[in-house]
Amino acid sequence: MSSLNLGKRRKMNRFVIARTLPYIILSLIGLLFLLPLLWLLFASLDQNATLALKIPSALTLDNYVSTVTNTDNQKSFGNGLILAVGQALLVVIVAGLASYPLSRYQLKYKRSFMYIILFATGLPITAVMVPVYQFFIYFRMQDSLFFTVLFLTASALPYSIWMMKNFMDSVPLELEEAAWVDGASIWTTLRLVVVPLMLPGIFTVGIFAFAGSWGNFLVPFILLQSPEKLPAAVTIYQYFGQNGLVQYGTLASFSIIYTIPAVALYIIGQHYMSQGFSFGGANKG
Amino acid sequence: MEASHPRVSKPKRNGGGEQWRAALFLSPSWLLLLLFFFVPTILTFYFAFTNMALTGATAAKTEFIGFENFKYMFQDANFRTSVWNTLIFLIFSAVIGQQVMGFIIAVLMNGRKQWFRSVIGSIVIAGWVAPEVVCAFVWFAFLNDTGTVNAAIESLGMKPVAWLYTFPMVSVIVANIWHGTAFSMMVFQAALGDVPKEVEESAMIDGASAWQRMIRITLPMIIGSVTTNMVLVTLQTLGSFTLIYALTGGGPGMATETLPIYMYHQAFVNYQLGYGTAISLMLLVIGIVASLLYMRMLKVKL
């Protein structure tokens, strides 16, 4: 009887360890992941921020105020918005138009088109930046926000068309047919039936595209030269490139303001990307 | 009658119209992709065989020089160094680092309390959602001579280390693991969620240990996700430029000069656009192979 109890207790002990160990390991990993970010947050709230993590002696929003009121910073956030919003809108429209026939019609070249699209999603954009730059120089398109938006759009199209077509496939055809029977034209059907049903897909693609170009450093870094056209991504780099001359607190608050749209959109986007990262058909959502 | 058999009757009514409309709807995509994606990709193949330069004697007229760039490339010790660096960075930060870290987190999270999972998950994802330049800045501060790591070391009575100069490759690898782990973690979480509970439970009843269950049951069931993730992570890391460039600029010396950085330096700092393109062609070819592999693995049915 007593030996049975002992065995039970030993089992209980192992059970407790097995239950708590994952919590301990995960907490440690979480702490290691958190520390670098925590510095950013504390430094942004500290008037005398250094490069080491320390709790600010007095919390202040001064860094944020001076970041936001600086006209150069406003300009660079504005440029970032022009690039990201312009590209996201264009991507949604162009990919949305393309996905309709790809999803609904029987086209001879559909298979090859989709294969090309899928293939292009994999290509690293970095690898084409040098020829793209030459191409831009040759046609005098360099240092232009407009052409940079067009390039960003094109580079986001492969995965956007792929995602959009998969979303479109999941919208039932019956509703469209009902609208046709009632005499609606193709445009009316698109506008009043397809687009509302596609909203989650449209938002997901738009958010993906926005986040991609908002965070993009290399493309504007190579295609834009004038200081007044550079987006926030490049401005941050230029700030902390000039080592030592910089107010780390201000730069930290700049970084946080610059990161907020990406985080906010991710949280909103999660709502639409319920299937998440399961590779069931679509590759990136 | 027509409404109930639309698939049969529609093409007869306006099959030709459909083709035209399809062409119309697809034309903006085609135009943009052609102009800004496929033409530059094809140009890569051409420019790589020229002596194009931004300054100097050859800047005025660009000539076709055959395989000269590639001949030079294979004798170029710096090129070999950057290929080696790319491999080290790729294998240790992505293939091993992000995947193993992501897998460990995903496995340990499986079955934990919901609030705990969301807290840890959010922290890891924050490093992934943050733009690469911000990640570079954060790690620049973290590993700086007067940064958090050194402050901690000093408080233990040890001498501070100039991490970015003494261990530059280790530094960028750690920073990239921090930045990229969330992706692998989410892929593995989704994959583990798809493993039926019954299978694991029956193995448990049969007396299989946790380790045996992991190796014999769980891993084989998610191996598809592992390989797909491997290719995706490889493709993402292959083109990785910003994090390394902003953190170390490829230095000190050639210590963290990966292919994208070397390509940038040759094309835009030394103004050797032809040679820079030849290097990007190498990147592109590796990317094409990985991309074809990826399509193979997805086994997409169109």
Image (tube, coloured by chain):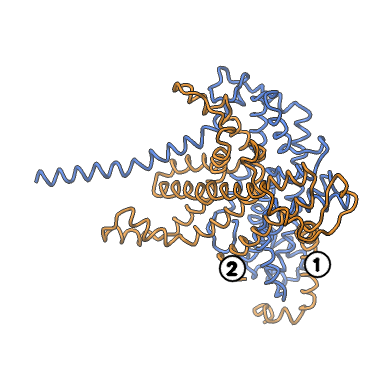
Chain colours: A blue, B orange
Tell which subunit mark 1 falls on.
Answer: B
Q: Secondary structure at mark 2?
A: loop
Query: Residue B91, how many percent across, how many down?
Result: 54, 50
Q: Residue furthest top?
A: A57
- Does B225 sit left or right of A213 as displayed? left
Tell which subunit mark 2 falls on.
Answer: B
Towards the viewer: B239 or B160: B160
Which quadrant is home to the C terminus of chain A?
bottom right
Towards the viewer: B72 or A259: B72
Please give the residue where the numbered disc 1 appears in the rendered image: B24
Q: CA distance from mark 2 to mark 1?
A: 26 Å
Q: Which quadrant of the structure image shows residue A167?
A: bottom right
Query: Residue B289, how many percent across, how many down?
Result: 63, 62
Q: Amino acid at mark 1?
A: Leu
The structure residue drawn at horizontal position 60% and vertical position 45%, both measured from the top left corner, is A266
Asked if A256 appears above or below A104 in the picture, the reply is: above
Please give the residue where the numbered disc 2 appears in the rendered image: B300
Residue A85: mark:
none
Towards the viewer: B123 or B166: B166
Give the crowd class for mark 2: few <14, some 14-19, many >=20 residues within 10 Å. few
Q: Is residue A59 visible?
A: yes
Asked if B11 appears above or below B169 in the picture, the reply is: below
Q: Amino acid at mark 2?
A: Val
Q: Residue furthest left?
A: A1
Q: Residue furthest front?
A: B75
- Does B41 sit left or right of B149 as displayed? right
The structure residue drawn at horizontal position 69% and vertical position 49%, both measured from the top left corner, is B76
Query: Residue B248, how many percent across, how many down?
Result: 64, 36
The structure residue drawn at horizontal position 78% and vertical position 28%, both measured from the top left corner, is A71
Q: Secondary structure at mark 1?
A: helix
Query: Residue B16, how many percent across, how many down?
Result: 79, 78
Towards the viewer: A158 or B231: B231
